[in-house]
Image (tube, helix red, strand yellow):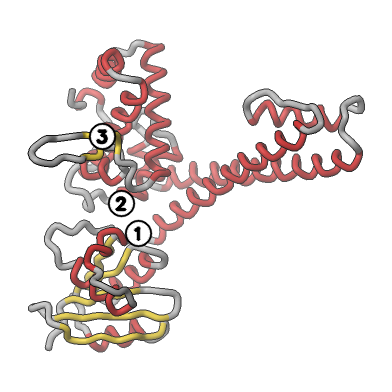
Amino acid sequence: MKIARVGVDIAKNVFHLYAVDSRDRKVWSAKLRRNQWLGTLSLKAEAGVEIGMEACASAHHWARELSARGFVVKLIAAQFVKPYVKSNKNDEIDAQAICEAMSRPTMRFVRPKSIAQQDAQATHRIRTELVGQRTAKANQIRGLVGEYGLVAPVGINQLRRALPCWLEDADNELSGSFRVLLHGLWADLIQLDSRVADLDERIKALLKQDPVATRLSQLRGVGPITATALSVALGDASGFKCGRDFAVSLGLTPKQHSTGGRERLLGISKRGDPYLRTLLVHGARAVVAATKRNRGRDRLSEWVLSLSQRKHANVVNVALANKTARMAWALVRYERGYSPEMLAG
């Protein structure tokens, strides 16, 4: 029988494949090693066959490998595969669930990322981790020196200025042993600052090399970090039918809990990528604050000011982040620059 679809449960070393024909009847199932499964699949299935996988670790790498061999790759978020897992769970059942999920006409798929997109995403993830480590280091320093009667003003810049003063002040309660330890913590903080600054420069270089990110940086509240992150998330924007679908994927739309014809909308769903959602909301907060100070007269400023008179500040920030996500989708999908005159009310 001719194979129509193959579900692949990927792992580090052992892969399970489950294939069906055009009538959804099982044709083939196998458990293969990492260095065997691509070659075996190429022998069993013809080019053009649909291959489904969960969008988890290493999925984008295997998607590129399969696409290069002529297969049609469909990546599915793990939460959309789980409802198709029947009864007990094992690798074969997981592969079967993937195979069934990818056949659904309303299924949502994840676009495979290119090497360049993976590089940009890795830069953002490393930077986020380093910023978290820097915050933890600053909090550790504050907690330790507090036991010696020293308190730094709020803000990491204030802490940076206070550290050398504490180390040079011979009249405070710091012992010689703790001064050595504090100097090491200060060096750690400087190193983390240097790493973050280096990655910021890398992101600015990525912005110049990426025409999509350059176009997105025209949006208000979108700087180099947000523009490059949006570029990675959108790709060519064909993975989303409209701008609202992209906003939904970021969790910027209300969560719905309706029944019996009675609609009930809650707060934003917070599904999808929390990193990109955070960037958009922080950017929107800056735009709202600047708009209130400057009282701009373009259509976006008027919309922000009008909404601010009726809604809470957090609602306004999220609404603007939602609108920014939709505009970003339109700029990429239709390959045009940002024009304030074209904004919808």
Q: Give the amino acid at mark 1.
A: Lys
Check whether the beta carbons of the residues at disc 2 and disc 1 lie within 8 A of each other: yes
Image location of residue 7, percent across then percent down: 25, 74
**Label 3 vs label 2, nearer the camera:** 3
* CA distance for labels 2 and 1: 8 Å
Q: Give the amino acid at mark 2.
A: Gly
Tag 3, which secondary structure?
strand
Q: Which residue is mark 1?
A: 113
Mark drawn on residue 145: none
Q: Earlier in the sequence, mark 1 or mark 3?
A: 1
Image location of residue 164, percent across then percent down: 80, 31
Tag 1, which secondary structure?
loop
Depth order, front residue of 307/200: 307
Q: Which residue is mark 3?
A: 266
Image location of residue 186, percent across then percent down: 75, 40
> Which quadrant: the N terminus?
bottom left
**Residue 298 visible within the image:** no
